């Protein structure tokens, strides 16, 4: 019988292999690459956007639905596991998740009858700031133009070495490692707004019992109060282990403003609930 290890992905970000939701929307174009000066201008716009991203977000709440999947090492037939429904609160730049439903049924305090083989956190902006921040020393290379959801986007590939990496992987309490990673960013050439970011890592330390991990986060315009913000709409995280594959597909819905009168129930959580904004 295969053993399932709770695996935490703390890139101070999130990681995964997008199961290509809406893959038909992605279209590479044969448009020639811009010259190096324009490429640097686009990268500068993306870097400025990423640097201000978290600071420009309001306090909000949303529903996070996580569908868990598993497959054999060489199989493409994914078996669906539990569906976890949480309330995600983003307050003063910090993220808190409160699990409320498992397979559409309320959880019972003190009773856990579900598995969480893969846990991630940090989808809201941390990955963007890590990739584009000076501390990452990321190298960027022009990839091409792609159209995603009718939006023409400039695509750059990036890589970050181990010395500057913030991708921390843990297998239960048995093994931990900070690993180098690489990926791609898809942004508007004029505004620098990021619509998609992917990343991945392979050649991982043997004691992690994991051969590869990858992530995709898709962003879209979301109305919160009187403002419109680019926020995650879907994300996916995937692990390839020695004897199986594990994947989390996440959907973010029902965004609304988090205010002092918002009511949140944190159930059996040992964490303190977030304080309302002053």
Image (spheres, helix red, strand yellow):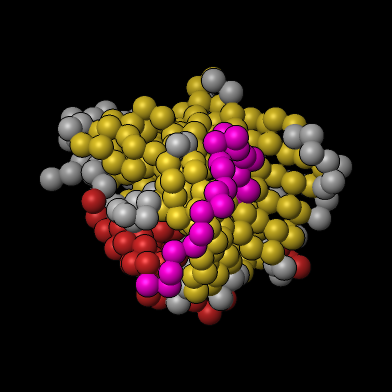
Q: Residue at x 51, y 48 (%)?
A: 146
- Residue 130 within the segment the image draws in magenta: no
- Residue 30 within the segment the image draws in magenta: yes
From the top left corner, tell me how far across and down residue 120 is, in percent: 53, 49
Q: Residue at x 20, y 41 (%)?
A: 276
Say which of 240 and 106 sits in front: 240
From the top left corner, tell me how far across and down residue 170 is, in percent: 61, 60
Say which of 41 and 126 sits in front: 41
Prevailing secondary structure of the magenta residues? loop
From the top left corner, tell me how far across and down residue 15 is, in percent: 56, 53
Q: Quadrant of the N terminus?
A: top right
Left or right: where 43 falls relative to 102? left
Instruction: Say which quarter of the image contains residue 205.
Output: bottom right
Q: Residue at x 70, y 30 (%)?
A: 80
Q: Residue at x 57, y 76 (%)?
A: 162
Instruction: Please state the total of marks drawn on the protein image.
Output: 0
Left or right: where 237 falls relative to 245? left
Q: Quadrant of the C terminus?
A: top left
In the rendered image, is residue 123 in sight?
Answer: no
Give the residue furthest to the bottom: 163
Q: Which residues are magenta?
A: 13-37
């Amino acid at each position: 019988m295969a053993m399932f290890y709770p695996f935490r992905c703390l890139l101070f970000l999130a990681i995964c292999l997008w199961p290509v939701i809406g893959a038909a929307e992605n279209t590479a174009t044969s448009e020639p690459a811009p010259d190096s000066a324009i490429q640097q201008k686009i990268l500068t716009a993306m870097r400025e956007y990423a640097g201000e991203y978290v600071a420009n977000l309001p306090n909000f709440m949303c529903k996070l639905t996580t569908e868990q999947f598993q497959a054999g090492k060489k199989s493409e037939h994914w078996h669906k596991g539990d569906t976890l429904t949480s309330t995600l609160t983003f307050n003063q730049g910090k993220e808190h998740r409160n699990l409320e439903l498992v397979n559409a049924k309320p959880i019972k305090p003190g009773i856990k009858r579900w598995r969480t083989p893969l846990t991630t956190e940090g989808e809201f902006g941390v990955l963007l700031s890590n990739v584009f921040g000076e501390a990452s020393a990321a190298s960027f290379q022009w990839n091409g133009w792609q159209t995603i959801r009718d939006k023409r986007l400039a695509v750059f590939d990036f890589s970050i070495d181990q010395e500057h990496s913030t991708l921390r992987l843990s297998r239960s309490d048995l093994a931990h490692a900070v690993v180098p990673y690489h990926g791609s960013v898809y942004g508007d050439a004029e505004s620098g707004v990021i619509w998609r970011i992917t990343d991945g890592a392979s050649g991982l330390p043997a004691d992690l019992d994991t051969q590869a991990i990858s992530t995709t986060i898709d962003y879209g315009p979301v109305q919160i109060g009187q403002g419109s913000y680019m926020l995650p709409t879907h994300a996916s995280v995937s692990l390839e282990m020695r004897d199986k594959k594990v994947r989390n597909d996440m959907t973010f819905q029902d965004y609304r403003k988090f205010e002092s009168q918002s009511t949140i129930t944190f159930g059996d959580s040992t964490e303190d609930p977030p304080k309302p904004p002053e």
